[in-house]
Image (cartoon, grey):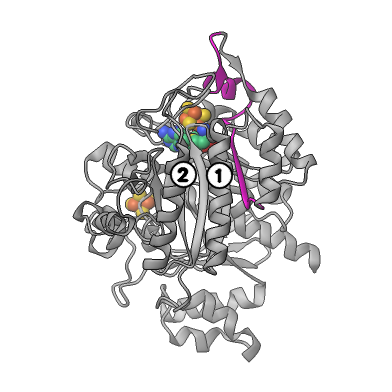
């Protein structure tokens, strides 16, 4: 049982301390007097506190107020070897640490064809429900080669440490030749110039030919994401093949088993809709039983978030699931990875939900550069046909993308929100699609704001259970 001792001022919408201008620390006691804390101003992870440490923090918060000031550190530090813990919890590094720039993350929409026809799919102009790729809808060999060379030149010119290439679509496994060619060329090119190169694939999991397994091995794919949309009957309502609308659940589960038998760890992506959320408890049990990590993402469309009462109903469905999960998942399978939600990562202070224009972009099947896969219809030029660096620079200097590059210039409701640096407003393209502006809270704001504390509490409970077992 938890005892909530944070005060009213910590609720969403009243975030700032009149004294420090900062967001408060979330601080909650478990019934045995241990506690957990989360720094909403500087998200740096969920911290579990043994009873003595919890008492010291509670006393300091009473004395100095919440959010705590720097002097709190001196008050709560019990011994010098604890100093690092408190420093990370209370005042983590606020300045960007100077480290070598990470990789450029690229969604490579290598196939604009798909054998399925999910009704909610956000890919613009996708050729759905095809049994073989429509001619011209997968990336041609000459274009593959130019795209990879261009991505390499962007990485070199703009100082990225390497490339993380995610093959997607459409269904990328309809373009296996193009994937193989892209892996072969980029593995050589990036290795020669000392830059990192990693590969991942997002697939619907219905087509896993033997050749795909050898590609996974040869190029050491770091991620294999497979989409499942809830428990079997609801998944099959969205993800079916052919005129008979044959459900794909059984095929996908068999393919997942084969992947696991071959030493791979597929990760499950689930889009939450007004229909399938009702079966999500059953689905989560299946993932836990099969030791599959998953991420739940609310559908990005215009109408679903507006359905009266739906966001509350989803929270009420998720609440008992995330109460159960800490006891079902060992600490070696952290909730934030194995039962993830949206784009949340509690250890990172986020000003925008994704890295678009800073560290990520999407490439269309003909090499068109876009901010993300939802906006492949608005591209800045083809890096298969034109010089790549000016196209990249054109995208990041487009005033339409200021939201991604200068989030501190925003003025809408998210700036006042306690969860600004955790939720960071949700998917900006979704917000734009619904409200015609980036500078508003997400259409899923109610769900995000109400579910975030439940999610953090689940993470804390998982840590507590592990600590209790060790004690
Ligand atoms: C576009 S698909 C491409 C890869 C592959 N065809 C698949 O289904 O996994 C990638 C992911 O985007 C998700 N997705 C598609 N449309 C969406 C939407 N409107 N809102 C949220 N997620 C969506 C899918 O469910 C899937 O997990
Ligand atoms: S399988 Fe993937 S690409 Fe195909 S329609 Fe469904 S979500 Fe879209
Ligand atoms: S969208 Fe997220 S950050 Fe914005 S107001 Fe809602 S909960 Fe807060």
The x, y position of residue 383, in whole percent, is: 35, 49
Q: Residue at x 61, y 66 (%)?
A: 35
Residue 144, numbered label: 2
Q: Position of residue 301 (x, y in %)?
A: 36, 32
Image-based side of 22 in relation to 70, left or right = left
Q: Quadrant of the N terminus?
A: bottom right
Indicate yes or no whether the magenta region holds residue 232: yes
Residue at image location 26% in from the left, 49% down from the top: 438
What is the x, y in percent for residue 467? Answer: 73, 65
Q: Nearer the viewer, residue 356 or 417?
A: 356
In the structure shown, which secondary structural element does the residue marked by tag 2 occupy? helix
Name the residue located 47 percent from the left edge and 32 percent from the top edge: 170
Residue closer to the observer: 380 or 436: 380
Confirm or reject: label 1 Cβ below 8 Å from ligand 1: no
Query: Which sits in the foreground, 148 or 229?
Result: 148
Dot placed on the residue nearer the N-terminal end, 2 or 1 = 2
Residue drawn at 40 percent across, 28 percent down: 126
Magenta stretch contains residue 361: no
Span highlighted in magenta in the image: 220-243
- Residue most toward the top? 244
**Taking the image as drawn, is residue 80 in sight?**
yes
Q: Residue under circle 1?
A: 181
């Amino acid at each position: 049982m938890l005892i909530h001792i944070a005060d009213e001022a910590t609720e969403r919408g009243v975030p700032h301390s009149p004294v420090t201008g900062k967001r408060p620390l979330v601080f909650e006691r478990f019934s045995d007097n241990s506690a957990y804390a989360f720094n909403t101003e500087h998200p740096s992870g969920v911290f579990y506190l043994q009873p003595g440490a919890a008492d010291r923090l509670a006393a300091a918060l009473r004395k100095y107020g919440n959010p705590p000031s720097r002097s709190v550190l001196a008050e709560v530090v019990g011994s010098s070897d604890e100093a690092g813990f408190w420093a990370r919890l209370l005042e983590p590094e606020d300045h960007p640490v100077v480290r070598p720039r990470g990789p450029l993350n690229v969604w490579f929409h290598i196939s604009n064809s798909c054998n399925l026809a999910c009704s909610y799919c956000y890919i613009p102009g996708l050729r759905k429900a095809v049994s073989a790729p429509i001619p011209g809808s997968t990336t041609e060999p000459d274009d593959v080669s130019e795209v990879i060379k261009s991505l390499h030149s962007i990485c070199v010119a703009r100082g990225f440490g390497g490339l993380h290439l995610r093959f997607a679509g459409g269904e990328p496994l309809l373009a296996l030749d193009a994937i193989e060619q892209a892996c072969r060329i980029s593995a050589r090119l990036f290795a020669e110039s000392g830059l990192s190169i990693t590969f991942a694939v997002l697939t619907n999991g219905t087509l896993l030919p033997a050749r795909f397994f050898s590609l996974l091995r040869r190029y050491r794919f770091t991620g294999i994401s497979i989409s499942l949309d809830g428990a079997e009957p609801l998944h099959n309502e969205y993800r079916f093949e052919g005129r008979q609308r044959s459900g794909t659940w059984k095929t996908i589960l068999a393919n997942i088993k084969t992947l696991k038998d071959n030493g791979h760890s597929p990760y499950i992506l689930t889009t939450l809709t007004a229909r399938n959320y009702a079966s999500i408890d059953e689905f989560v049990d299946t993932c836990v039983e099969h030791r599959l990590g998953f991420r739940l993402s609310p559908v990005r469309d215009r109408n679903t978030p507006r359905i009266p009462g739906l966001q509350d109903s989803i929270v009420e469905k998720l609440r008992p699931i995330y109460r159960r999960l800490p006891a079902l998942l060992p600490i070696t399978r952290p909730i934030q990875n194995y039962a993830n939600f949206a784009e949340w990562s509690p250890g990172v202070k986020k000003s925008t939900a994704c890295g678009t224009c800073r560290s990520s972009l999407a490439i269309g099947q003909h090499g068109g550069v876009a901010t993300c896969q939802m906006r492949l219809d608005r591209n800045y030029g083809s890096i298969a046909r034109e010089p790549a660096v000016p196209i990249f620079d054109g995208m990041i200097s487009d005033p339409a993308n200021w939201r991604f590059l200068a989030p501190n210039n925003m003025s809408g409701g998210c700036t006042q929100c306690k969860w600004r640096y955790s939720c960071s407003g949700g998917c900006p393209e979704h917000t734009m699609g619904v409200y015609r502006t980036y500078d508003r809270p997400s259409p899923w704001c109610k769900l995000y704001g109400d579910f975030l504390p439940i999610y953090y509490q689940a993470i804390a409970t998982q840590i507590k259970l592990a600590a209790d077992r060790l004690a």
